Amino acid sequence: MDFNTDHFSLFELPTRFRLDSTLLDQRYLEMQSRVHPDRFSRAGDAERRLSLQWATRVNEAYQTLKKPLSRARYLLHLSEHDVGSENNVLMPADFLIEQMEWREAVAEARAAGEHHELEHLHHRLQHDIAQRYDELAALIDESHDLEQAADRVRRLMFIEKLLVELDEAMIACEE
Amino acid sequence: MKIHVTLARLARKTRASPKEDEGVATGMVGAPACGDVMKLQIKVGKGGVIEDAKFKTYGCGSAIASSSLVTEWVKGKTVEQALDIKNTQIAEELALPPVKIHCSILAEDAIKAAVADYKKKHVDQAAG
């Protein structure tokens, strides 16, 4: 095994956004059982250290590829396309206004304890997210427009955060 | 993405939103890294002096504190003076840890965006 391969090669998967998640899970479990430190408990220090390094490496790769957003960011990173999330604050105004409205709607429904409304928002947001990932997949895998893909990734970073807030609001309402 | 705001909500929003005053300008910014969204509104009076400022921020405590602080700081300043507020000053005042520096950058950029909006409207009015 080579430490310098990218995450896709590590699991012998094609370097693309659309991914067979069952296959990823399967390969991950196979590798994890091969490199797990427990198997090396009687081995020498060097071998134990190496197995630990590998186990960490395999975990990190799996976590990165499993979630679509981090997978997309990783793909952009591999093609040296910086998402620029740290210093890119000038998102399109209409997008930010929509984000503001979504967050206001979630905050209002949460404050009023409207669980039904939150469920409704959740349903709509998940539908929206699914569409966005379809679009992102086409941009990365088919049209190879990584500039646009980076823009879509930045938007999804807001939306994934919104989903977390929405989940929290729903839990808070159930309590 | 199109949000289908329910009619009741839309009506509520329309009533709640203040009239678009001539001197009111809005800056909207967002940081993908944390998914925070910040809206800063300034009311600019004679001589380009900021009379009032309001914020609405959806984000972590540091982002809220940063935007709250800049609303205090910009009041009484001219729009040009407001542009001199730097994120480092905000971070220092709030003793933000390194991982939260982007919150202060967001607040600084919100000022820039609000001033840019004011100038844009101002030029439009002068031209029209």
Image (spheres, coloured by chain):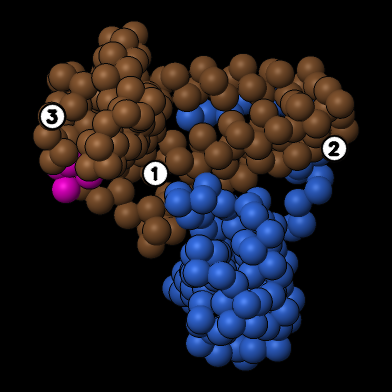
Q: Is residue B12 visible?
A: yes
In the image, is B65 to the left or to the right of B87? Answer: right
SS at badge 2: helix
Alpha carbon separation for disc pair 3 and 1:
34 Å
In the image, is B34 to the left or to the right of A155? Answer: right
Instruction: Return the residue at label 3.
Output: A1
The residue type indicated by label 3 comes to Met
On the same chain, marks 2 and 1? The answer is yes
Q: Quadrant of the C terminus of chain A?
A: top right
> Which chain letter goes with mark 3?
A
SS at badge 1: helix
Mark closer to the observer (3, 1): 3
Mark closer to the observer (3, 2): 3
- The total of numbered circles placed on residues is 3
Contact between labelled residues 2 and 3, with CB atoms less than 8 Å apart = no
Residue B116 position in % (x across, y down): 48, 71
- Please report whichever mark, 2 or 1, sits nearer to the chain's N-terminal start: 2
Is A51 or A5 nearer to us in this picture?
A51
Contact between labelled residues 1 and 2, with CB atoms less than 8 Å apart = no
On the same chain, marks 3 and 2? The answer is yes
SS at badge 3: loop
Instruction: Return the residue at label 2.
Output: A111
**Display colour for chain A:** brown
In the image, is A159 to the left or to the right of A171? Answer: left
Which chain does blue denote in the image?
B
In the image, is B100 to the left or to the right of A113? Answer: left
Instruction: Return the residue at label 1.
Output: A154
Residue drawn at x 31%, y 10% as measured from the top left: A26
> Which chain letter goes with mark 2?
A
Q: Quadrant of the N terminus of chain A?
A: top left
Magenta stretch bounds: A75-80
- Please report whichever mark, 3 or 1, sits nearer to the chain's N-terminal start: 3
